[in-house]
Image: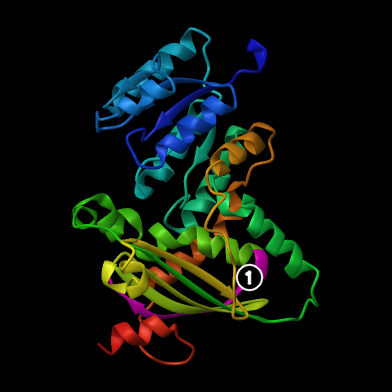
């Protein structure tokens, strides 16, 4: 890669769990990380990727450094955003304000009107906002989409989505346990599944919530070509017993017409693949994220109806024990 094609990156939220995948993607695509920010200074992981990157724990100093680089004709091409969900909107605005494109983790923002406001700023700035929607790049999911598109357009499928990913007490204390900051369970751990289902099976026709607590949520989505019963949880008690016996703390299952969709592997390089597409101006753009943002917003603000209508089998177990 010649020096003219090497892009300059800044990264916000480098101390977070998902940041390592962004660091790897920036490195794997042959680009440079010039500056990174996180209020947590336990970020030794940077040494494995970009030990020369400047690091800041205060946004104001990070901002000043980026501006100093700009005044010396060193411009940021991209700002990668891995900060807490409620800060995404502000950090995307920062990226566009300094003349960079934004690459933001999911959920892009917490509210659908935030998408509309960002669309205006994107238009004014001439820069682009990209969302990491890596499930759309998973080989099994891509193959599934092709299969569904080859079937009659009026065929309605039955889907059951179950995702249980155990979290300890730290979760409640962190920003993730604060619904105002994370958007709650459906937003924090479910938004990419909803995006994937809407992408394949079409727009939401009906959105019903049966259960909604700080640790779990369940409901029913009627899509253009699918009926979806879903259950999301961070509670270890919801893990099936046979998984507990093998000391597993995560359970993920999606069935399509009673057939399991296998996609437990193949996630390793999806962020790098996302970056490759973004660098070719082919990444997933702002408005593509809006349907799933609208869906989880409605889930977050819905009044649960309990065991009425079409509900997930684990939802019954939770509400009757």
For the C terminus, give its image quadrant.
Answer: bottom left
Q: Return the residue found at the far top.
A: 72
Give percent across and percent down for residue 60: 30, 25
Quadrant in the picture for residue 63 = top left
Q: Residue at x 64, y 34 (%)?
A: 276
Q: Which is more toward the observer, 92 or 266?
A: 266
| Residue at position x 74%, y 81% in the image | 155
Q: Which residue is painted at 37% across and 82% down in the image?
A: 315
Q: Is residue 56 left or right of residue 264?
A: left
Q: Is residue 147 found left or right of 182 in the rendered image?
A: right
Is residue 250 visible in the rendered image? The answer is yes
Image: magenta residue range: 200-214
The chosen color scheme is: rainbow
* Left or right of residue 3, residue 233 in this image: left
Q: Position of residue 217 (x, y in %)?
A: 36, 73
Confirm whether the magenta stretch covers residue 51. Answer: no
- The residue beneath circle 1 is 203
Position of 48 relative to 183 (above/below): above
């Amino acid at each position: 890669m010649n020096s003219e094609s090497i892009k300059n990156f800044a990264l916000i939220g480098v101390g977070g769990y998902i940041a390592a995948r962004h660091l790897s993607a920036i490195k794997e695509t042959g680009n440079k990380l010039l500056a990174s920010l996180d209020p947590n200074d336990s970020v030794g992981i940077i040494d494995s990727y970009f030990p020369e990157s400047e690091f800041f724990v205060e946004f104001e100093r990070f901002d000043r450094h980026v501006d100093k680089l700009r005044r010396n004709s060193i411009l940021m091409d991209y700002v990668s955003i891995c900060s807490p969900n409620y800060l995404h909107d502000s950090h995307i605005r920062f990226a566009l304000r300094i003349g960079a494109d934004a690459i933001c983790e999911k959920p892009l923002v917490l509210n659908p009107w935030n998408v509309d406001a960002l669309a205006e700023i994107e238009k004014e700035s001439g820069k682009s906002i990209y969302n990491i929607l890596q499930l759309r790049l998973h080989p099994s999911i891509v193959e599934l989409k092709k299969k569904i598109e080859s079937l009659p357009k009026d065929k309605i499928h039955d889907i059951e989505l179950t995702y249980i990913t155990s979290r300890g007490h730290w979760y409640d204390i962190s920003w993730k346990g604060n619904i105002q900051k994370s958007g709650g369970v459906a937003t924090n751990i479910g938004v990419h599944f909803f995006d994937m289902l809407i992408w394949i099976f079409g727009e939401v026709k009906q959105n019903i919530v049966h259960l909604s607590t700080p640790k779990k949520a369940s409901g029913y989505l009627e899509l253009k070509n699918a009926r979806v019963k879903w259950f999301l949880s961070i509670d270890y008690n919801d893990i099936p017993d046979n998984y507990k016996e093998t000391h597993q703390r995560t359970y993920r299952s999606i069935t399509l017409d009673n057939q399991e969709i296998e996609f437990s592997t193949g996630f390793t390089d999806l962020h790098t693949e996302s970056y490759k597409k973004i660098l070719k101006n082919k990444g997933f753009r702002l408005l593509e994220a809006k349907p799933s943002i609208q869906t989880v917003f409605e889930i977050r603000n819905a009044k649960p109806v309990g065991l009425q209508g079409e509900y997930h089998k684990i939802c019954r177990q939770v509400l009757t024990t």
